[in-house]
Amino acid sequence: MDFFDFHHHKKNIQYGIYNLDLDAVPLESSYSIGIHPKDIAVDSLEEQFRWLKSNISENCLAIGECGLDSMVPIPQNIQEKVFLRQIYLSNEIRKPMIIHCVRKFYEVISFKKKAEQAVIIHGFNKKQRIADDLLKNNFYLSFGKAVLYHLSLQDIVRNTPLDRMFLETDNEQFNIEELYSKVSDLKGISLEKLNEQILENLDTIKNG
């Protein structure tokens, strides 16, 4: 059985969504493309957006990573402008968004009101309260390697509806089948059922 890797940075993985690096050329497999908060170049923003728009092909499944990050040196107001432009681009081309968020979840929730397409928080590993608030605002949560050992995150996975989750390796080196197996145990369902639901979720976000 093949397991879909919702967000990864590895060119050798074909079954999933590859996160395209800034200024890179798209692969022939499925990918996401966006301007990450850490990569924002204040003096060449228009050039970055030209790269982004010119590399959106039929294999592009999502806009991202994009979002807000309190730990990078880019001024908050600039991050918000770049994020908002990518939300509008997502609306225009009808692609879901993969969100990178560090200590700015409630700001991201406020921006969600402007998004017309599905919005997925990748690599979620915060508290239940934040998960609940995101889910109430119709976000999807994508979980990674931390689920294998983080007990409170395992509880969040148990409490997250199956139709609002994805699973990913991000830039971690491990086999995603381990994660699917762990989540199937936590949810008390078969691997086949979990796999089927993840693919159903994928179809949902792709079709608006």
Image (cartoon, helix red, strand yellow):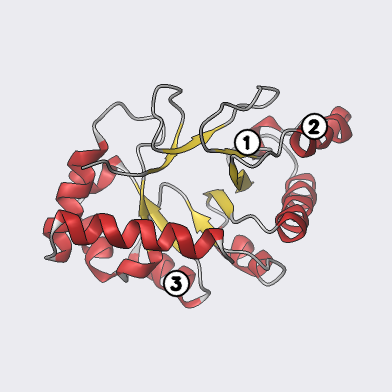
Residue type at the position of mark 2: Gln
Place of residue 198 in the rendered image (x, y in percent of width and height, measured from the top left): 34, 57
Q: Which residue does the image show at 24% across and 32% down from the upper left? A: 175
- Quadrant into which the C terminus falls: bottom right
> Which numbered dot is residue 48?
2
Question: Which residue position is annotated with label 3?
Answer: 135
- Disc 1 marks a residue whose amino acid type is Val
Instruction: Give the residue pinned by disc 1.
Output: 72
The earlier-in-sequence mark between 3 and 2 is: 2
| Residue 42 seen in render | no
Q: CA distance from mark 3 to mark 2?
A: 31 Å
Q: Amino acid at mark 3?
A: Leu
Mark 1 vs mark 2, CA separation in Å: 18 Å
Residue 48 in percent (x, y) is at: 79, 32
Crowding at mark 1 (Cα within 10 Å: few <14, some 14-19, many 20+): some
Q: Is residue 194 left or right of residue 132?
A: left
Q: Nearer the viewer, residue 33 or 15?
A: 15
State the SS at label 1. Answer: loop
Q: Which numbered mark, 3 or 1, is in the foreground of this view?
A: 3
**142 left or right, relative to 21:** left
Determine whether, in the image, residue 178 is placed left or right of residue 2.
left
Label 3 residue SS = helix
**C-alpha distance separating marks 3 and 1:** 26 Å
Q: Residue at x 38, y 37 (%)?
A: 15
- Residue 53 falls in which quadrant of the image? top right
Q: Is residue 137 left or right of residue 157?
A: right
